[in-house]
Image: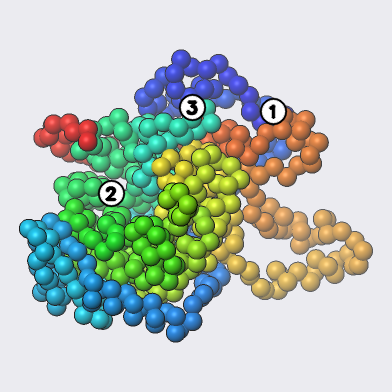
Amino acid sequence: MKLFQRHAAPEQGYPDGDLSKGGIMADGDLPEPKRQRGGRQKLRDARVGVEAGVHRPYITRGIPTYDILSEESLVAIEKTADRILAEIGIELRDDAPTMQLYKAAGAEVTPQTEGVWRVKFPPGMLRDILKSAPSVFTQHARNPANNVRIGGNNVVFAPSYGSPFVMDLDRGRRYGTIEDFQNFIKLAQSSPWLHHSGGTVCEPTDVPVNKRHLDMVYSHIRYSDRGFLGSITAPERAADSVEMARILFGEAFTDQNCVVMGNFNTTSPLVIDGVTAAGIRAYAAANQGSIHLPFLLGGAVAPLTTAGMVAQGLAESMASCAIAQLIRPGAPTILASFFSSMSLRTGSPTFGTPEPAIGSLAMGQLARRLNMPLRCAGNFSTSKLPDGQAMQQSMMSMMSAVQGGANYVLHSAGFLDGLLSMSYEKLVMDTDMCGALHAYLDGMVVNEDTLAFDALNELGPGQHLFSTQHTLRHYETAYWDSALDDNQPWETWDEQGGIDYAQRANTRWKKILREYEAPVLDQATDEALLDFMARRKESMADMWY
């Protein structure tokens, strides 16, 4: 049986007829692939269908978190974070309303230059403010079956975010387009192992900078029925994202429930800029979720020691989270960290290395002490290809999120090239790993059935267990089964063409896109969204930078 069969290549776009001559194809336009089906393929296809049918909206962990630090070490990090906030402070730029919020809450605010303030926080002040942040909240999806619970023992996987480039084995590395953006949403929507549609899964560089947020938010709504992230790159774009969520969910429902979130980065070290602060205020005022993320590169914008990096990250995220609670106490707010080491010989960032993974474990403990949801880590890699390096680094990083207790894991699928590239092959490779992590996080159930005394007793010593009643009851569900791994004998694999993992992933993402069907969207809602987008686009000239 051939696992990959070539078709006539189109004049442009993807080979094998998977994507036609540029542009987004309507549902059903993709040609049915010509493929040979043997018994093994039929079983695999049937299994994938079963997987899709039992998609879980999120994971409730069945294993404990791993607490890496002692109480003494945790207290030392917290005291250092408090000292950073009290003695060095945060520089706030170009957002007087946030300056007034901090000042009214008791911070010491000192003007530096026009529109720039140094803000210092008395020890304990931010912790008191953050007590109003919910420890667990629900982000509603347009399909209620896909609502996610964020916080507590819950784990949510979302695809990667923010890459300007995309890549695949056929066309290599190139700037992302709106077609790529929508393809990644479709692939994520089709995976039973992801729970959230994510946000800027890649930058659609063929759409004007000041208008692409409209197309991105609409694409999440149109091609997925899961939760999504809105825009944060300008206050008006944040406001547009919230308004589109109101059109989708209704104004009254949106005011009382989280239906969209924004992912906000501080400007490390120790700076919050006006665009970020104003965006946080926009989401929080609308009672929508916000993620507060310092992007720390050890040795560059943070100390190169892990403990120092964690202390700085905690300080920055707390100061950012406080803005949301000062605007609207109780607004959904996620503490976050993004730790990266670097090659001190070359100055290049490195991802998927052990020291940042240790930092993520520590952040898990610190978030639990604050009683706040946590975002950290993901399937990080600096590899330029979907290869062994990519998956080794990814597992190092992703396991730290899983073991450390992260509640919302952005960058769960597709991350390559140090976040500069979103990879089609890596996305399906990572989602397969996410499937394995579902089984890992489920832990072990111990009861009369799982202890399986009857399985051994039925035939007695020296007999294999393939035909026992216990095996027959459980053989279809006992183990997680990869959609990509090849576990055949070497001879069979070789006879079938010696197809490697990346090539199998290439075949799989194309198959998923061929078979993708968009979830139904109410026609009146769709028209209202398109009308809003048209009016907003007509109100401004195109900007390309």
| Residue at image location 50% in from the left, 33% down from the top | 168
Q: Nearer the viewer, residue 88 or 69?
A: 88
> In the rendered view, does 374 fall on the left or right side of 481?
left
Quarter of the image holding residue 314? bottom left
Q: Which residue was labeled with disc 2? A: 230
- For the residues marked 3 and 2, what is the alpha-carbon distance in whole angstroms? 29 Å
Q: Which residue was labeled with disc 1? A: 2
> In the rendered view, does 331 fall on the left or right side of 73?
left
* Outermost residue toward the right in this view: 462
Which image quadrant: the C terminus? top left
| Amino acid of disc 2 | Gly
| Residue at image location 63% in from the left, 48% down from the top | 482
Answer with mark 1 or mark 3, whichever residue precedes in sequence.
1
> In the rendered view, does 158 fall on the left or right side of 220?
right
- The disc placed on residue 171 is 3
Residue 476 percent location from the top left of the image: 68, 52
Q: Residues within 10 Å of mark 2 (few under 14, many from 20)?
A: many
Residue 102 percent location from the top left of the image: 15, 70
Label 1 element class = loop
Which image quadrant: the N terminus? top right
* 288, above or below 244, in the image: below
- The answer, for residue 350, to whether it is visible in the render is no
| Residue at image location 40% in from the left, 26% down from the top | 25
Residue 224 percent location from the top left of the image: 38, 43
| Amino acid of disc 3 | Arg
Residue 47 percent location from the top left of the image: 63, 45
- For the residues marked 1 and 3, what is the alpha-carbon distance in whole angstroms? 22 Å
- For the residues marked 2 and 1, what is the alpha-carbon distance in whole angstroms? 42 Å
